[in-house]
Image (cartoon, rainbow, N blue to C red):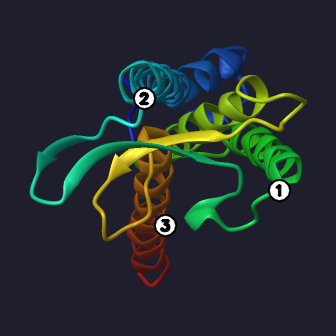
Amino acid sequence: MIDDTTDALHTTHSGGRLSLFRATRMSLLVAGVIAVLDQLSKAWALRDLADGHIIHVIWTLQFNLTYNRGMAFSRGTGLGPVIGVIALVVVVMLLLSLRRADNSLTRLATGLIIGGAVGNILDRLFRGSGWMRGAVIDFIDFQWWPVFNIADMAIMIGAATMIVAMLKYNSQIERTDGQ
């Protein structure tokens, strides 16, 4: 169990590496689960929606297969390799930042973002004709919002959670410093 009140990442004794591993384990587990769920859902979408079939779920929500060769909101079409390399750099930076993640909320957010980024990077790597030239599979369609996937949801939820963690823990630090 990870305790928010102790800073397992700043230990200097011989168990420091083990503490670091324990602290990052949740992030890596979350990232792995998100990447697997994302790829499984995309495999389903490719299998069941490839013929142009649209599945109406509820209200405006439908499953509708699209291919995104750009980034969010289909901007940057044709820049797939550049976007993929930037995503790889971001994943590496986030993995390195886990050493400094000192609370569970930040580790959860980081895991969500890493998992989502890896899910979309896998599409770029393996769903195209060249290195990072693949299209990201999108299929969740509200019809009034750009079509997206589980990886995109994880990235957005992770980013929002990271903001909440920063606000929460920065306000706690300010209260402690002011006393």
Dot 2 falls on a residue whose secondary structure is loop
> Separation of disc 3 and disc 1 at Cα?
34 Å
Q: Amino acid at mark 2?
A: Asp
Q: Nearer the viewer, residue 3 or 24?
A: 24
Name the spot of residue 177 as percent of width and height, x first: 50, 78
Measured along the vertical axis of the image, is residue 118 above or below residue 84? above
Residue 112 pos. (x, y %): 48, 41
| Few, some or many residues within 10 Å of mark 2 (<14, 14–19, 20+) | few
Residue 49 x/y as whole percent: 38, 30
Q: Is residue 174 above or below residue 161?
A: below
Answer whether residue 131 is visible to the viewer in this image.
yes
Q: Say which mark, if any, is on residue 166.
A: 3
Q: Which residue is mark 1?
A: 78
Tag count: 3
Q: Which mark is residue 51?
A: 2
Q: Amino acid at mark 1?
A: Gly
Do the residues under discs 1 and 2 have CB atoms within 8 angstroms?
A: no
- Looking at the picture, does residue 134 appear above or below residue 138? above
SS type, badge 1: loop
Relative to 18, 177 lies left or right: left
Q: Quadrant of residue 52?
A: top left
